[in-house]
Amino acid sequence: MKIIVTGGAGFIGANFVYYELANHPDDEIICYDKLTYAGNLETLKFAETNPHFQFVYGDISSRDEVYKLFEIVAPDIIVNFAAESHVDRSIEDPELFLRTNIIGTSILLDACKKYGIKRYHQVSTDEVYGDLPLDRPDLFFTETTNLHTSSPYSASKASADLLVQAYQRTYKIPATISRCSNNYGPYHFPEKLIPLMIINALHDKNLPVYGTGANVRDWLYVEDHCAAIDLIIRNGKVGEVYNIGGHNEKTNLEVVKTILKILGKSESLIQFVTDRKGHDQRYAIDPAKIERELGWTPKTKFDDGIQKTVAWYLENRAWWEKIISGEYQNYYAKMYGNR
Ligand code: NAD
Ligand code: DAU
């Protein structure tokens, strides 16, 4: 089986490349990535020596490049992780999110229509459902919850989902969609909550918690997300949406305090800063469908996963020190300088 992993040089895509190479050693994995600020070939260095792995540089929103990729590779499966993924950046500048996340998805689907495909899988997000109120812990997102987006990022991801469903119905593209909750683990880009807080704490810098820190996210260890996608592309039913999450809800403040405790740092580093515009209150996934139909269950408990993640950042300083020494400093000053 030849599997193209778009966005495979990013956080979840790279973890998925490693998952596939380890669990399906006979398959060919082709990573297709534009290497934006979030893409990093260092992340794939352990795959590069594997004869079943290949890296192809390219942009999902370039029709010529994508068609050439399909002509050369003739893939059986395409798993689309490629996206602009950070909510705060989408609030600053939405346009690139529309180009990559919507136009890029439509071009991949056009390529599937033109050249044929056994399976197209869209890696989507629970953010397409909007948010849940903090005072209704009985409510969860199911696959039939209405799409109700809050940020330019989530609107672009929801638009892409609608395109996938339209191509599936109209052109019979054999497509599936998964909507996962917040991931954490190795290779997470340090603009996101967990790695940002680990790295700031290691430098004894303030930890910028938006608003009161009461917003709730439903955390899933990245390898559990990869295992779920692997099951969907092999056993999932065409035309279906699968929610992925492990009932692991935490307030942001709980997460930040846990990191400080593991690192032996003081809670006085916490600094409450101006809230994110349109900030979603609570995400919470009901994963009953994928558990029931595909037998998926998460393996890593949050207490173990967060310990492993902090240990990974301590053991892999060179990976993130290189990232934060570059353009990241300008990003940090712009986003947090006067917050
Ligand atoms: P990321 O930002 O770490 O990585 C994105 C990757 O896509 C990078 O390697 C980047 O270079 C590549 N890319 C961006 N634009 C591209 C383009 N035009 N053409 C080709 N490659 C391009 O993102 P992530 O956190 O790994 O998320 C991966 C996917 O999973 C996204 O689609 C995201 O919406 C979805 N998702 C993420 C989470 C999460 O918690 N991180 C949860 C649910 C779903
Ligand atoms: O739910 C899935 C989504 O999770 C994915 O679709 C997105 O790609 C991914 O980035 C993530 O979105 P969030 O906005 O939830 O993740 P982020 O790490 O940016 O923020 C998590 C929470 O922490 C959120 O409530 C905002 C808050 N936060 C974040 C940062 C970066 C802070 O309080 N301070 C910060 O500095």
Image: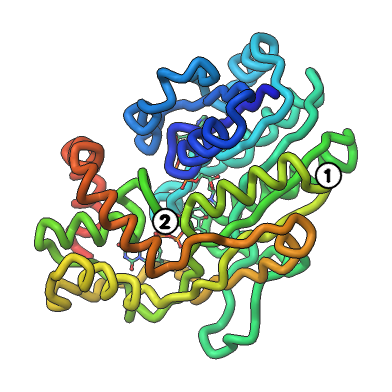
| Quadrant location, the N terminus | top right
- Furthest-left residue in this view: 204
Q: Residues within 10 Å of mark 2 (few under 14, many from 20)?
A: many
What's under tag 1, amino acid-wise?
Answer: Val
Whole-percent x and y of residue 78? 67, 31
Compared to 2, does 176 lie above or below? below
Which residue does the image show at 46% across and 36% down from the upper left? 14
Expressed as whole percent of the image width and height from the top left, the position of residue 306 reads: 35, 63
Q: Is residue 295 left or right of residue 66?
A: right
Q: Which mark is residue 184?
A: 2
Residue 206 at what x, y percent from top left? 15, 66
Q: Amino acid at mark 2?
A: Tyr
Image point (18%, 44%), residue name: 329
Give the colour scheme of this rendering. Answer: rainbow
Q: Are marks 1 and 2 in contact (CB under 8 Å)?
A: no
Disc 1 residue crowd, few under 14, some 14–19, many 20+, Cα 10 Å: some
Residue that numbered label 1 is attached to: 238
Q: Horizontal placement of 330 versus 282: left or right?
A: left
Using the image, determine if residue 34 lies above or below residue 176: above
Q: Residue 39 versus residue 335: which sits nearer the camera?
A: 39
- Report the residue at 46% width, 26% height from top: 34
Q: Is the C-beta of the residue carrying label 2 under 8 Å from the nearest atom of ligand 1?
A: yes
Label 1 residue SS: loop
Find residue 92 and name its label.
none
Asked if residue 330 can be seen in this view, the reply is no
Viewer-side residue, 251 vs 90: 251
- Mark 1 or mark 2, which has the lower sequence index? 2
* Front one among 186 and 115: 186
* Displayed-image quarter of ligand 2: bottom left
Image coords of residue 29 (percent x, y): 57, 25
Residue at (11% x, 56% y) in the render:
203
